[in-house]
Each structure stands twice: as structure tokens, then as C-alpha cells.
Amino acid sequence: MTLAEKILARASGKQEVKPGEIVMARVDVAMSHENADVVLRAFKEIGIPKVWNPDKIVLLFDHRIPAECEKTAETHKRIRKFVKEQGIKHFYDMYAGICHQVLPEKGHTIPGEILVGTDSHTTTHGAFGTFATGIGATEMAGVWATGETWFKVPSTIKIEVQGKFKPWVSAKDLILYIIGKLGADGADYKAVEFSGPAIKDMSIASRMVLSNLSMEMGAKVAFVEVDDKTLEYVKSRIQNTGDRIQEIVSDGKYEKVIEFDVSSLVSQIACPHSVDNVKPVYEVKGIKIDQALLGSCTNGRLEDLEVAAKILDGKRVVKSVRMLVIPASWEIYLEAMHRGYLEIFVRAGALVLNPGCGPCLGAHQGILAEGEVCVSTTNRNFQGRMGSSESFVYLASPATIAISAVKGEIIEP
Amino acid sequence: MIKGRIWKLGSNVNTDVIYPGRWLKITDDPKEMASHSFEGIMPEFVSEVKKGDIIVAGRYFGCGSSREQAVACLKHLGIGGIIAESFARIYYRNAINLGLPILIAPGISKKVEQGNFDFIEVDFAKGLIKLKDTEIKVAPLPKFILEIIKEGGLIPHIKKKYR
């Protein structure tokens, strides 16, 4: 069976499952951020007094921190109260960072387990061999009440990647290229498995970029092949894994196998207003920018800050550009501080913000006005997502956005 | 069988345009949520939509975020159901869980004209669609999903099952 089939079979108590079959599966980790407010309303409506297992629920705030308005402040307050009432111990409030970085860091993301989150980019956790997928708030209320939910067993696309990246070309460029080829719904309802030498060579952070952005081709789950690097990371993050790490080798039948070679890949950029509108950066060279955003659950990790710091060291962000830097977590923030990256950013004239989602979803901290252009390391460029319906978001790698901030226009690193 | 006016939309209609992220701070007032439906790309939608109207869309309706407000807002406006060539999976689940009828109908967008508010008749349970001069039969939703929708969504469904 493929990884998705194996994990769903185990979680539903079956010997074998087949694509298309619908199963009821036990959930191992149930994650929510601010939208836990919507979840707890639905949960209270069910009328069951206690959640099925308070230790399997992980909550934190990342979308709108610190509270940008009174409504959000009330949301945060209601969730804090609920956490106390229910005895939920894995609650990080606004002191940890973006959920998709924090859960692996704090040892909640385990290979072979089922992790559901009320956030579409929950696919990120597939980088650890976890069956991780996004669900809605009402469905999460059902999980809180019963500990299970239904899944249609997905068929699996295997993506094999060969070769070595050119300098300044990274996982972000690869996954944008893949989305450009397969399309925004190229993997809708399907599982994806990434493997091959180029994937093996990748850091954990880079693998997370692939699983994160696979959501933008519709993937239900996006696994990266588990290897020693994965196990080493996971074991360093959890005191006692016990028997929690289950068999994680895929040996099933794939719907199709697609091969890529990164050796000749150049920097890629997703142009407005869809993530599959992907071009080589040189094709849109010279477009003037107003904002450059480095951060998010896609590219706010240490290696992303490092590459941008290398480019910005001793340079200035051009006066016409607002550059925002948002580390993905407190751990990353501290380490970037320790290594001097944050000083480089501040001296270069960038604004370093607190870990969180920042302006990615258009809630606060850097909203775009009509006609403005932002190059961003985030994962969505839908019309109006980051502000005005008449603004334009281009998605690219940390290297591309850093050099573009210095030049004031889109340019290849 | 329900009958409603058609709102014809294209492909890849994402949750950010259905319900902008800046309004995610609204968590408890469906009426307020509803007032922001499609505000960026179709500011006329909220005032022109009528109870029972049916959205007919192209491929991959509801792609993007998991935000449930993007279903709740349309449900509150009285949208009778959504028919699309295909749905993004989280939107599909959210619609079921909030009891908003949906149907996957390959090829439907070619059979429906843009913006003339023709009527469409749909039997979501049987997968039957009637247009002015044609009838289309598609696969109905699986039985247990139809049951959730019939009961008004996941919450009433769970209530019934566990109490």
C-alpha cells in the first residue's frame, strides 16, 4: 500500500484499504489556531461537555497576533477560557509562532500519524511522513467530540526528483515549477509522495516547503519520504516517542509517477492572481515593487532568513520598497537574532515583525493599497488576498525577494 | 427537486474572493459574514442574490483556505446549492458539514450561459439537473454524505448519533 493507504488502514482498523473507499479514521493530533473560536461554538452546539482527549488537541494563535482589533481580542479571550475549562495542555497562546512550524518544533508532528488542522496548509506536516490535512471548523468540532472523522482514501501521485540545484535556486522554485506544470487542481483529492536524490539532499525546512505548497495544487496530503534526517529531527523534538513512530515505507501502486530534474531549474515566480501562473523570474524582470515579504509557513525558517541575510548583508533595501521580515517561530526568531541575521535586516532598512502569519492572508501587518505590488515568499497570490482587490502579489523564493527588495524591482538572484 | 436562478461563475473560484481574509475576525454572526460575500470581485452579489439561487461554477470551486465562513456566508444568503465541475476538497467537506447541498457535474459550465439568470432545477439526492432544454444525470453524492446534508450538517448528525 502507499503511505496514505497504510496510515488510513491502520487508523480505521482495517487490513487493507483502496483508493476511493471511505473510512472512519481515528485522529492523533487535532490542531487549530484563531479559528478554534468557530470550532468551539460548533462544539458547544453538539452538547458534549468534554472534548474526547484534551492531550491530543493543540491550540495556538498565529493568524492575528497580537490582536489587531477588538473582535480578535475577544476571540483570543474565549479560546483561552475554553483551554482552561477543558484542561488542554498543549496551548501556546501567541508565544510560539506559526502552527505549521511550531507543531514539528514542539514534537507534535509524528511520522505515520494522522494530524488534522483547521488550516489548509496543514499538508506541511507531510514533510515528516505524517498524514496531515486541512479540515473545516465544524468538522473539527466533530473531531473534538468523537476523536474521528471520515476520509476518502486518496490515490497517490509519486514525484521523483533528481539532480542538484544551481546556486540561489531552492525548494520554493522547484515546487512553484511543479505547480505550474500540474496546475492548481493537478493533485485535487490526491496524495503526493516526494522522493528521489534531490529530496534526500534537502534539509527538513526545504522539504516542508514542498509539502506546504502542495496544497496549492490541491493535494490532500503531501508526504516526503521518511529517512534518517526525518527521524533524527523528530526524535530530537520529543522526549519519548515510544512506539508512536509507525511503519512509514510506501510500497504501493501509484496513480502516476512524475519525474523532475532540478539541475537546469532557474528561479521561478507565481504571477497574479493564481499560484499556477508560474514563469521563470527573468520573464517578469523589471516589474517595480512596493513591498517585499519574507516569512510565512512556507518560507519563514532559518535557512530562508539566512539566504536573505547573505544577500542583504551591508546593502540597503531601496527607499521605495517596504521590506517585512517575519520569522516563522520564536525558536527561529531567537536563533536568527543570535546569528546576527535580524541585525542585518534592520540595518538594511527592513521591518522585523513578530513571528506569526503577518499580512499573508490580508488581516493585518502590511496590507496592500490599490495598484501596489508585493513580492512575497508566502503561498497564495489570489486577487485581494493581501489587501486591495486591485493589488498584485508575486510568489517567489527568499533569494528572489531579497535581491528584488534591494533593486526595487523583480530580478533574478 | 429544487428550482432556482443561476449564478454562473468560472473556474478556480477561491475562498479569498468568496470571503476575504480581513473578515475572518467575524466568528459568530452569519449575517455580518454574509454581507462580505464576494465583495472584492462582485460587489453587487449580496444585494442581488435571492433565496434559492443556485451557483453553477467551473472547475475547482472553493480552492484555497479552509475558512468555513466561505460556506457559511453563502448559506446565510440562502444559496440553495452549488453545482460545479469539481470542488476543492476542503470546501466540498465544509459544504457537507454545514448542510449546503453540492453536486459535481462535469461539463455543466458549457451548458449554462453567463449572467442571464436562467432557472435550473436540481435533485441533489438523485444527481438530476434540468435546464431550459436539457436534462443532465450525474453521480449523486454518497449515501452517508446525503444523510449529513439532509440532517442539516455535521452537528445535527453527530447529535443524533451520540445522544
Image: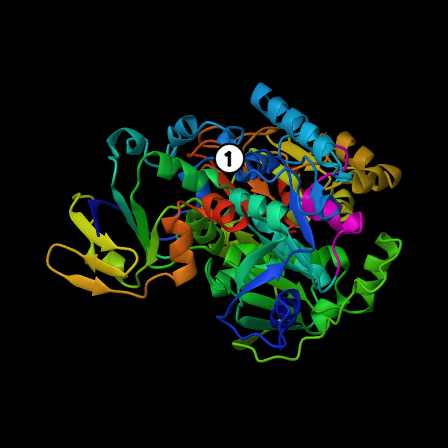
- Please state if A218 lies on the left or on the right of B104 as rendered: right
Most foreground residue, B123 or B19 = B123
- Please state if A295 lies on the left or on the right of B64 as rendered: right
Residue A299 shown in magenta: no
Q: Which colour scheme is used?
A: rainbow
Picture coordinates of residue B12 (x, y %)?
Answer: 40, 52
Q: What residue lies at 71% left-to-right and 44% top-to-bottom?
A: A58
Host chain of mark 1 = B
Report the amino acid beneath label 1: Gly
Q: In which quarter of the image is residue B128?
A: bottom left
Q: What residue lies at 75% left-to-right and 46% top-to-bottom?
A: A55
Picture coordinates of residue B91 (x, y %)?
Answer: 45, 50
Above or below, comparing residue A281 to residue A335 in the picture? below
Q: What residue lies at 69% left-to-right and 74% top-to-bottom?
A: A196
**Which span of residues is magenta-colored?**
A94-110
- For disc 1, the marked residue is B21
